[in-house]
Image (cartoon, rainbow, N blue to C red):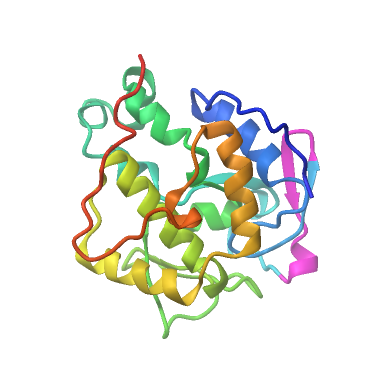
Amino acid sequence: MLLLSVVSEAAPANFDQAKKLAQRIHAPEAGSFYCDCAIRWQGKKGIPDLAGCGYQVRKNGPRANRIEWEHVVPAHHFGHQRQCWQNGGRKNCVKTDSTFRAMEADLYNLVPAIGEVNGDRSNYRFGVLPSSPAQHGACPVKVDFKQRVFEPPPQVRGDIARTYFYMADKYNLNLSRAQQQLFMAWHKLDPVSATEQQLNQRTRQHMGHDNPFISGDREWHPGYRPTGYGLVVRQ
Protein backbone atom coordinates (compact mmCIF):
# COMPACT_ATOMS: atom_id res chain seq x y z
CA MET A 1 0.00 0.00 0.00
CA LEU A 2 1.25 3.48 -0.87
CA LEU A 3 2.01 5.50 2.23
CA LEU A 4 1.45 9.25 2.22
CA SER A 5 2.02 11.83 4.91
CA VAL A 6 -0.87 12.22 7.31
CA VAL A 7 -0.39 15.99 7.13
CA SER A 8 -2.86 17.64 4.74
CA GLU A 9 -1.15 19.32 1.81
CA ALA A 10 -2.36 22.18 -0.37
CA ALA A 11 -4.76 21.33 -3.17
CA PRO A 12 -3.22 21.57 -6.64
CA ALA A 13 -3.48 24.99 -8.25
CA ASN A 14 -3.62 23.73 -11.83
CA PHE A 15 -3.89 20.62 -13.97
CA ASP A 16 -0.12 20.12 -14.24
CA GLN A 17 0.24 20.06 -10.46
CA ALA A 18 -2.79 17.79 -10.19
CA LYS A 19 -1.30 15.18 -12.53
CA LYS A 20 1.83 14.94 -10.40
CA LEU A 21 -0.18 14.47 -7.23
CA ALA A 22 -2.58 12.04 -8.90
CA GLN A 23 0.34 9.78 -9.74
CA ARG A 24 1.37 9.73 -6.07
CA ILE A 25 -2.19 8.89 -5.05
CA HIS A 26 -2.82 6.10 -7.57
CA ALA A 27 0.67 4.63 -8.04
CA PRO A 28 2.21 2.15 -7.75
CA GLU A 29 -0.39 -0.58 -7.38
CA ALA A 30 -3.35 0.90 -9.27
CA GLY A 31 -4.18 -0.40 -12.73
CA SER A 32 -5.64 1.65 -15.57
CA PHE A 33 -9.14 2.81 -14.70
CA TYR A 34 -11.28 1.31 -17.45
CA CYS A 35 -9.19 -1.69 -18.50
CA ASP A 36 -7.40 -2.59 -15.25
CA CYS A 37 -4.08 -3.00 -17.03
CA ALA A 38 -0.98 -2.98 -14.83
CA ILE A 39 1.06 0.21 -15.09
CA ARG A 40 4.83 0.55 -15.05
CA TRP A 41 5.97 4.04 -14.10
CA GLN A 42 9.14 5.62 -15.46
CA GLY A 43 9.25 8.97 -13.71
CA LYS A 44 6.10 10.80 -14.80
CA LYS A 45 5.53 8.40 -17.69
CA GLY A 46 3.10 5.54 -17.21
CA ILE A 47 3.29 2.52 -19.52
CA PRO A 48 0.36 0.08 -19.48
CA ASP A 49 0.97 -3.67 -19.80
CA LEU A 50 -1.27 -4.18 -22.83
CA ALA A 51 -0.29 -7.79 -23.42
CA GLY A 52 -0.87 -8.71 -19.79
CA CYS A 53 -4.45 -7.43 -19.80
CA GLY A 54 -5.37 -8.51 -23.31
CA TYR A 55 -5.76 -5.01 -24.66
CA GLN A 56 -5.82 -4.64 -28.45
CA VAL A 57 -5.02 -1.36 -30.13
CA ARG A 58 -8.04 -0.07 -32.00
CA LYS A 59 -6.38 2.68 -34.01
CA ASN A 60 -3.84 4.80 -32.12
CA GLY A 61 -0.82 2.76 -31.07
CA PRO A 62 1.23 5.60 -29.53
CA ARG A 63 -1.61 6.69 -27.25
CA ALA A 64 -2.47 3.09 -26.41
CA ASN A 65 1.04 2.63 -25.04
CA ARG A 66 0.89 5.47 -22.54
CA ILE A 67 -1.14 6.42 -19.50
CA GLU A 68 -3.03 9.71 -19.53
CA TRP A 69 -4.94 11.44 -16.74
CA GLU A 70 -8.59 11.34 -17.65
CA HIS A 71 -11.27 13.67 -16.35
CA VAL A 72 -14.19 11.40 -15.48
CA VAL A 73 -16.42 14.45 -15.80
CA PRO A 74 -14.99 15.93 -19.01
CA ALA A 75 -13.60 19.47 -19.09
CA HIS A 76 -16.18 20.26 -21.77
CA HIS A 77 -18.97 19.35 -19.34
CA PHE A 78 -17.81 21.60 -16.52
CA GLY A 79 -16.44 24.35 -18.76
CA HIS A 80 -18.51 24.86 -21.88
CA GLN A 81 -21.20 26.98 -20.23
CA ARG A 82 -18.71 29.30 -18.59
CA GLN A 83 -18.05 32.71 -20.11
CA CYS A 84 -14.36 31.99 -20.50
CA TRP A 85 -15.10 28.94 -22.67
CA GLN A 86 -17.47 30.88 -24.89
CA ASN A 87 -14.81 33.53 -25.34
CA GLY A 88 -11.94 31.22 -26.25
CA GLY A 89 -12.44 27.62 -25.23
CA ARG A 90 -10.50 25.60 -22.70
CA LYS A 91 -7.21 27.48 -23.16
CA ASN A 92 -8.89 30.75 -22.32
CA CYS A 93 -10.53 29.21 -19.24
CA VAL A 94 -7.18 27.96 -17.99
CA LYS A 95 -5.73 31.43 -18.47
CA THR A 96 -8.53 33.57 -17.07
CA ASP A 97 -10.89 31.55 -14.82
CA SER A 98 -9.68 30.44 -11.37
CA THR A 99 -12.81 28.37 -10.76
CA PHE A 100 -12.25 26.45 -13.99
CA ARG A 101 -8.64 25.79 -12.99
CA ALA A 102 -9.85 24.40 -9.67
CA MET A 103 -12.33 22.10 -11.43
CA GLU A 104 -9.70 20.99 -13.95
CA ALA A 105 -7.27 20.23 -11.10
CA ASP A 106 -9.75 18.49 -8.78
CA LEU A 107 -8.05 15.23 -7.84
CA TYR A 108 -11.30 13.37 -7.25
CA ASN A 109 -12.08 13.70 -10.96
CA LEU A 110 -8.76 12.31 -12.27
CA VAL A 111 -8.05 8.65 -13.07
CA PRO A 112 -5.18 6.92 -14.93
CA ALA A 113 -6.45 5.71 -18.29
CA ILE A 114 -4.90 4.15 -21.37
CA GLY A 115 -4.38 7.07 -23.72
CA GLU A 116 -6.28 5.56 -26.61
CA VAL A 117 -9.29 4.85 -24.38
CA ASN A 118 -9.10 8.39 -23.03
CA GLY A 119 -9.15 9.67 -26.60
CA ASP A 120 -11.99 7.37 -27.66
CA ARG A 121 -14.09 8.39 -24.67
CA SER A 122 -13.52 12.06 -25.60
CA ASN A 123 -16.30 14.07 -23.93
CA TYR A 124 -18.97 11.44 -24.72
CA ARG A 125 -21.67 10.77 -22.17
CA PHE A 126 -21.66 7.51 -20.26
CA GLY A 127 -24.29 4.93 -21.11
CA VAL A 128 -24.97 1.27 -21.84
CA LEU A 129 -24.44 -0.16 -25.34
CA PRO A 130 -25.73 -3.76 -25.31
CA SER A 131 -25.65 -4.17 -29.08
CA SER A 132 -22.23 -2.58 -29.69
CA PRO A 133 -19.16 -4.80 -30.19
CA ALA A 134 -16.01 -4.61 -28.09
CA GLN A 135 -13.29 -2.63 -29.86
CA HIS A 136 -10.29 -2.86 -27.54
CA GLY A 137 -9.68 -6.57 -27.10
CA ALA A 138 -10.26 -7.79 -23.56
CA CYS A 139 -10.75 -4.26 -22.24
CA PRO A 140 -14.49 -4.18 -21.39
CA VAL A 141 -15.39 -0.78 -22.80
CA LYS A 142 -17.59 0.06 -25.76
CA VAL A 143 -17.87 3.25 -27.81
CA ASP A 144 -20.60 4.41 -30.15
CA PHE A 145 -18.92 7.20 -32.07
CA LYS A 146 -22.09 8.20 -33.91
CA GLN A 147 -24.24 8.50 -30.81
CA ARG A 148 -21.27 9.81 -28.78
CA VAL A 149 -21.82 7.30 -25.98
CA PHE A 150 -19.17 5.44 -23.96
CA GLU A 151 -19.93 2.30 -21.94
CA PRO A 152 -17.56 1.69 -19.00
CA PRO A 153 -17.07 -1.74 -17.37
CA PRO A 154 -19.41 -2.65 -14.50
CA GLN A 155 -16.64 -2.59 -11.87
CA VAL A 156 -16.08 1.19 -12.19
CA ARG A 157 -19.63 2.38 -12.85
CA GLY A 158 -20.25 3.18 -9.21
CA ASP A 159 -16.94 5.05 -9.03
CA ILE A 160 -18.03 7.10 -12.04
CA ALA A 161 -21.43 7.84 -10.51
CA ARG A 162 -19.94 9.06 -7.24
CA THR A 163 -17.46 11.24 -9.12
CA TYR A 164 -20.30 12.85 -11.06
CA PHE A 165 -22.29 13.41 -7.87
CA TYR A 166 -19.26 15.01 -6.22
CA MET A 167 -18.45 17.32 -9.14
CA ALA A 168 -22.08 18.31 -9.67
CA ASP A 169 -22.54 19.05 -5.96
CA LYS A 170 -19.31 20.95 -5.45
CA TYR A 171 -19.41 23.05 -8.62
CA ASN A 172 -23.17 23.26 -9.17
CA LEU A 173 -23.12 21.34 -12.46
CA ASN A 174 -26.29 20.33 -14.24
CA LEU A 175 -27.05 16.62 -14.56
CA SER A 176 -29.98 15.62 -16.75
CA ARG A 177 -32.73 13.49 -15.26
CA ALA A 178 -31.56 10.56 -17.40
CA GLN A 179 -27.98 10.97 -16.15
CA GLN A 180 -29.11 11.11 -12.54
CA GLN A 181 -31.24 7.98 -12.90
CA LEU A 182 -28.37 6.11 -14.58
CA PHE A 183 -25.82 7.14 -11.97
CA MET A 184 -28.09 6.40 -9.03
CA ALA A 185 -28.58 2.89 -10.44
CA TRP A 186 -24.83 2.47 -10.94
CA HIS A 187 -24.18 3.69 -7.39
CA LYS A 188 -26.40 0.93 -6.02
CA LEU A 189 -25.18 -1.81 -8.35
CA ASP A 190 -21.49 -1.02 -7.75
CA PRO A 191 -21.16 0.11 -4.11
CA VAL A 192 -18.08 1.71 -2.60
CA SER A 193 -15.14 -0.70 -2.49
CA ALA A 194 -12.21 -0.84 -0.09
CA THR A 195 -9.92 0.44 -2.85
CA GLU A 196 -12.20 3.40 -3.50
CA GLN A 197 -12.21 4.21 0.20
CA GLN A 198 -8.40 4.12 0.30
CA LEU A 199 -8.17 6.46 -2.71
CA ASN A 200 -10.67 8.77 -1.05
CA GLN A 201 -8.49 8.93 2.07
CA ARG A 202 -5.31 9.57 0.10
CA THR A 203 -6.95 12.25 -2.03
CA ARG A 204 -8.36 13.97 1.05
CA GLN A 205 -4.81 14.53 2.27
CA HIS A 206 -4.26 16.83 -0.71
CA MET A 207 -7.72 18.29 -1.30
CA GLY A 208 -8.49 18.96 2.37
CA HIS A 209 -11.89 17.24 2.16
CA ASP A 210 -13.25 13.91 1.03
CA ASN A 211 -15.81 12.92 -1.57
CA PRO A 212 -18.91 12.77 0.66
CA PHE A 213 -20.64 10.42 -1.77
CA ILE A 214 -17.87 7.89 -1.11
CA SER A 215 -17.67 8.43 2.65
CA GLY A 216 -21.46 8.25 2.90
CA ASP A 217 -21.88 11.73 4.40
CA ARG A 218 -24.13 12.66 1.47
CA GLU A 219 -26.49 10.66 -0.71
CA TRP A 220 -27.73 11.72 -4.12
CA HIS A 221 -31.46 11.41 -4.61
CA PRO A 222 -34.09 12.54 -7.13
CA GLY A 223 -34.42 16.29 -6.83
CA TYR A 224 -31.03 16.70 -5.12
CA ARG A 225 -29.96 20.34 -5.23
CA PRO A 226 -26.20 20.83 -5.65
CA THR A 227 -24.69 23.10 -3.03
CA GLY A 228 -21.99 24.64 -5.22
CA TYR A 229 -19.64 24.85 -2.23
CA GLY A 230 -16.55 24.77 -4.45
CA LEU A 231 -17.41 27.81 -6.58
CA VAL A 232 -15.70 30.33 -4.29
CA VAL A 233 -12.04 30.13 -5.27
CA ARG A 234 -9.24 32.45 -4.28
CA GLN A 235 -7.79 34.42 -7.16
Q: Residue at 50%, 52% (x, y): give it.
A: 119
Residue 78 is covered by the magenta coloring: no
Above or below — where is 139 with respect to 117? below
Question: From where the camera sits, is residue 13 visible?
Answer: yes
Magenta span contains residue 51: yes
Q: Quadrant of the C terminus?
A: top left
| Left or right, 185 with reference to 16 | left
Image coordinates of residue 220 in percent, x first then y, are: 32, 60
Give whichever of 182, 125 is nearer the camera. 182
Q: Tell me which residue sits at (77%, 40%) in the image.
A: 3
Residue at position x 80%, y 67% in the image? 52
Instruction: Report the side of 102 relative to 138 (left or right).
Output: left
Q: Eyeballing the image, is 164 above or below 23?
A: below
Q: Is residue 135 visible?
A: no
> Which segment did they paint magenta?
42-54
Residue 15: x and y, percent?
51, 30
Q: Nearer the viewer, residue 229 or 153?
A: 229
62 to 161, vertically: above or below: above
Left or right: 42, with 123 as reference point? right
Furthest-top residue in this view: 235
Tell which of 83 and 209 is nearer to you: 209
Q: Place residue 25 in its image quadrant.
A: top right
Residue 49 image offset from top left, x and y in percent: 78, 59
